[in-house]
Amino acid sequence: MTGSEPGHGHDLAGRTVVVIGASAGIGLETARQVRAEGGGVVLVGRDPERLRQAALELDPVGTAAFDATDTDRLQEFFQDLPGPVDHVLVTAGGPYYMPLESMDLAAARRAFDERIGMTLGVALYSRDRIRAGGTLLFIGGTGGRRPGVGLAIASAATAALPALVANLALEMAPIRVNLIAAGFVDTPLSASLLGDEIDARREELRTTLPIRRVVGPADVAALAVHIMCNGALTGATYDIDGGQQLLPR
């Protein structure tokens, strides 16, 4: 196999990328950048209407509306793909904030199981659909690396994902498996979580981050595209937070 063959890297022209969580935020922006590079996209999202709007903009190879934590539906999706793909990006899944004093154990177990189960499910069901040298790429976070009230589930998942990805890189080789760990990213999800506090948070980051601006979906998407295109990258976690982890709490 040479560097110009499908799945080996270097560019996205003529490649097919599955984006799970494609209807907004990082997933949508990555799909835009893939299309700008000449690649085709298969868009997956939970919200049929938002997915339809994304499809109108991006002219995808295909779309599928379902919740990626439904592993039965996830298996059907990969089985029904009409052919092999070059890369799979998974942005689905949000943070879980559950203080112990008000924690519902069943909900906590479900949240952790859904995050890890979805990651394993994507790996299991995509392994025969991704071309050799292609990429399975997950989006995680950095916030759970520091302990805090309500962060037990988020911290556990944050710690588990890099180890899981490293092991998957060995088991899925020559498919490459990587993780992007993002800090605060200015997405619709961030705005919905923070509500009226979003503007204050943006201003705080603009004045305190070493890069003196807020990280946006395009920044993370650019990193995702680079990891897809660089055929030497596998089994690693790549931080993108504008230097947020360097700041005191």
Image: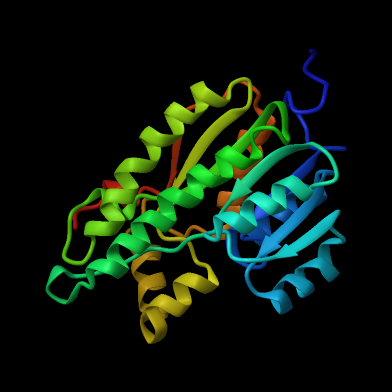
> Residue 202, image x and y in percent?
41, 71
> Residue 124, image x and y in percent?
57, 38
Q: Quadrant of the C terminus?
A: bottom left
Furthest residue to the top? 1
Whether residue 182 is visible = no
Give me the residue at 49% from left, 46% from top.
119
Classify 56 as above or below 208: below
Classify 161 as above or below 53: above
Furthest residue to the left? 101
Give me the residue at 56% from left, 39% from top.
123
Furthest residue to the bottom? 196
In this rendering, would 101 be left or right of 151? left
Please give the count of numbered marks on the rendered protein: 0
Q: Quadrant of the N terminus?
A: top right
Give me the residue at 27% from left, 52% from top.
155
Query: Residue 88 falls in which quadrant of the image?
Result: top right
In this rendering, would 215 be left or right of 3? left
Query: Residue 39 falls in which quadrant of the image?
Result: top right
> Residue 161, image x and y in percent?
39, 42
Question: Observer-nearest residue: 210 or 175?
Answer: 175
Whether residue 247 is visible = yes
Query: Residue 73 falls in which quadrant of the image?
Result: bottom right
Question: Observer-nearest residue: 117 or 90?
Answer: 117
In this rendering, would 132 be left or right of 89? right
Q: How is the image coloured?
A: rainbow
> Residue 135, image x and y in percent?
64, 34
